[in-house]
């Protein structure tokens, strides 16, 4: 039996990201550090829209 992917860690275009998914497999929390070392923390709703963002 295969479970839902709940955690993603990777880099794309110079941005490192940690994404935590809900039980439905959709992203709910995103932590990123871009190529300029700027940090972004986002809380997402069930549709992937940002509902709270800290440290843009």
Image: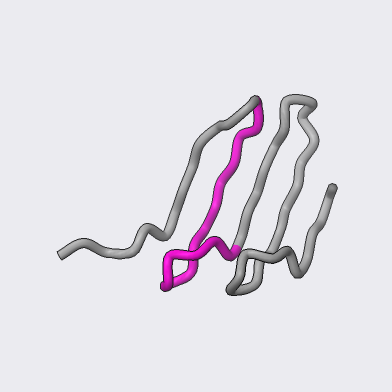
- Residue 21 shown in magenta: yes
How is the rendered protein coloured? one colour
- Give the residue at x 44% y 54%: 7
- Residue 15 shown in magenta: yes
- Give the residue at x 55% y 52%: 19
Q: Position of residue 30 (x, y in %)?
A: 63, 54
| Vertical placement of residue 46 versus 50, above or below | below
Q: Position of residue 14 (x, y in %)?
A: 65, 25
Q: Position of residue 40 (x, y in %)?
A: 75, 47
State which region is magenta. Answer: 14-28
| In-image side of 46 versus 7 (left or right) | right
- Give the residue at x 79% y 59%: 53
- Give the residue at x 42% y 60%: 6
Residue at the far right: name it.
Answer: 56
Residue at the far left: name it.
Answer: 1
Q: Main secondary structure of the magenta part?
A: strand
| Vertical placement of residue 9 versus 43, above or below | above
User: Residue 5: which quarter of the image?
Assistant: bottom left
| Vertical placement of residue 4 versus 46, above or below | above
Q: How many marks?
A: 0
User: Residue 48: which quarter of the image?
Assistant: bottom right
| In-image side of 33 versus 10 (left or right) | right
Q: Position of residue 17 (x, y in %)?
A: 59, 41
């Amino acid at each position: 039996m295969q479970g839902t992917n709940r955690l993603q860690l990777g880099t794309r275009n110079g941005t490192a990201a940690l994404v935590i998914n809900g039980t439905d497999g959709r992203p709910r929390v995103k932590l990123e550090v871009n190529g300029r070392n700027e940090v972004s923390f986002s809380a997402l709703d069930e549709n992937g829209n940002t509902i709270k963002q800290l440290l843009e």
